Image (cartoon, rainbow, N blue to C red):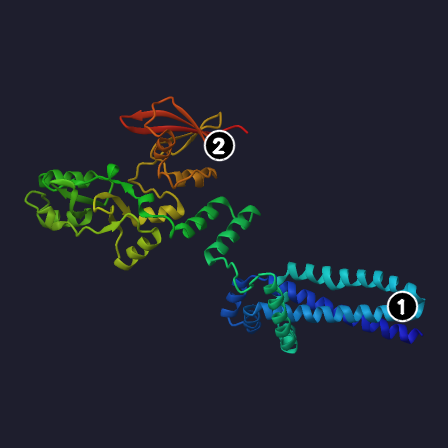
Amino acid sequence: MITEILIFSGIIFLLILLSGIFSGSETALTATSPSRIHRMAKGGNKRAHLVERLMDNSGKLIGAILLGNNLVNILASALATAFFIRLFGEIGVVYATLIMTVLVLVFAEILPKTYALTYPERTALKMAPFARLTVWLFSPFVSLVQIIVRLTLKLFGIDINQQNILSAHDEIRGAISLQAQEGGLIKDNKDMLDSILDLQDVHLEDVMKHRKIVEMINALDSPEEIFAQIVTSPFTRLPMWKNDPDNIIGVLHAKEVLRAVKANDGRAEGLDFIHISGEPWFVPETTSLQEQLAKFRSENAHFALVVDEYGAFMGVITLEDILEEIVGDIYDEHDTLSLGAKILKNGAVVVSGDSAIRDLNRQFNWDLNDDVAITIAGFVIDIAETIPLPGQKFIYDGFVFEVLKRRRNQITSVSISPTKK
């Protein structure tokens, strides 16, 4: 009798161990990071190559592992029930149920799955050969089961072939948001990564320098006046117009001008700045930042003129503008530092009217709608449906907007404060 008990215990132990291996393999191969496995496979790890192949056909993999796991669990429960009935009679069914529930739950499910979730890549690499053998053994049965499942679901009008698959961008964005929420990413890094993903959705009109603040050169000015404007300007490249500001005929580069002046014995007199200027490059305002960045790289250029659908000059876009959209403002020794937003003691935020809504959302974790306007001044005008006067307040979407200053028809300063809940 003792020998029989020992044999029975050994068989149950082996079945529970096998069930634990099945459970751990399933959890590890579904929880492991595809990107890490891919990187290891590219580095020459043969086990990682095998894991990639298994994950490529996840349906057959999971089906085979579940089939094997259920087989050993049912077999272990059946043997235990038969053995306990022999020992204790009909009450043995209760004993077998209680004992096998505890053994399977703890040692075949929770313990191996906890370990696999803690070390998913390590477990997946170790279990890959076992998983491949399982798929090879049960593949015909899994195919039959999958056919039965599809036919059964079709009876209820469910087509599993029509799956809602997230794009790579959505998956990456979700991973970034999750890591930031769990403290794995600091806010600046999250903003930078989000901005990279947003490049394809943001257009030039959203980040360009508007024509109103673009410094330009009148081609009809005297050479001395043009040269004086160039050397005193903080910008390296300046658009040049003739007769009409919309009629841009070239772009002057400060270095080219200095070379020409040097070749002219250090004098600007007599120079033909139209001849010195480079060909203007016009791009539509609806171009995405990702497309423009690719064009800048392919053309070895840093500066372009933005026009609307009618060809009217709207503003300028530079390579630095696109980079600043990713990493934030970049200042050099010739830039005028912006004071940015001022946070008052009462919690209100005072910003200039030309502050970009995207920048404010990123800085303060707000969710203001930047589809209706690019700047906060445009946002307030859209809410008011007119050009408001200083002192007017508007409550919208959980915020109080107060116009502080206005110059002619332009709102120059706005106070923003979240409403108290």
Q: Residue at x 61, y 65 (%)?
A: 29
Q: Is residue 288 left or right of residue 240?
A: right
Q: Amino acid at mark 2?
A: Gly
SS category of the residue bearing label 2 = loop
Q: Quadrant of residue 73?
A: bottom right
Q: Can residue 133 be seen by looking at this rendering?
A: no
Q: Is residue 303 left or right of residue 44?
A: left
Q: Amino acid at mark 1?
A: Phe
Q: Quadrant of residue 150?
A: bottom right
Residue 313: horizontal and vertical position, in percent? 22, 43
Residue that sits furthest to the left in the current view: 270
Q: Residues within 10 Å of mark 1 (few under 14, many from 20)?
A: some
Q: Residues within 10 Å of mark 2 (few under 14, many from 20)?
A: few
Position above or below: 351 against 175: above
Foreground of the two, 166 or 257:
166
Foreground of the two, 91 or 297:
91
**Quarter of the figure with the N terminus:** bottom right
Q: Residue at x 65, y 67 (%)?
A: 25
Q: Residue at x 63, y 64 (%)?
A: 28
Residue for badge 2: 398
Residue 403: horizontal and vertical position, in percent? 37, 26
Residue for badge 1: 84
Give the mark, 1 or 2, whose residue is nearer the N terminus: 1
Q: Is residue 35 left or right of residue 143?
A: left
